[in-house]
Amino acid sequence: MSDYSTSVIQRAMQARENQKKKRPVPAVPSLRDQQIFQRVVVNCERQCAIAAELRITPGRVSQIIGRVRHWLAQGSQAILLCCRN
């Protein structure tokens, strides 16, 4: 590799590391959000039924599921509050 290619790769790697450091730690989802996630993903309930029951839109249910899923994927201390005994 040329010196130019090496320096470009090094700068890109450094930029990626800096970007990782700036990311905020995702907030722990609320108990309600975790319960919604559990009902849809674990219990296989329909999003539209949960939305109607909670008087929120199905789109909002989908956003909540995505947020909880993202939180879990980040390797957070993922002990779901709704599943604790």
Image (spheres, grey):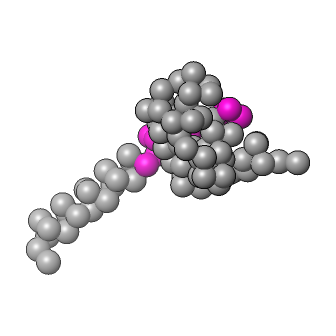
- Outermost bottom residue: 1
User: Is residue 38 in view?
Assistant: yes
Q: Which of 77 and 1 is in front in this view?
A: 77
Residue 17 on the magenta segment: no
User: From the viewer's perspective, is 14 left or right of 39?
Assistant: left
> Which residue sits at x=31%, y=59%?
13
- Outermost top residue: 55
33 lies above or below 20: above
Q: How many labels does the image show?
A: 0
Q: Which of 14 and 29 is in front in this view?
A: 29
Image spot of residue 56 (x, y percent): 53, 24
User: From the viewer's perspective, is 21 left or right of 14?
Assistant: right
User: From the viewer's perspective, is 85 left or right of 51?
Assistant: right
Q: Which of 76 and 72 is in front in this view?
A: 72
Image spot of residue 46 (x, y percent): 55, 44
Image spot of residue 15 (x, y percent): 31, 50
* Image quadrant containing the N terminus: bottom left
User: Is residue 67 in view?
Assistant: no
Q: Nearer the viewer, residue 66 or 12?
A: 66
Residue 21 on the magenta segment: yes
Residues in magenta? 20-32
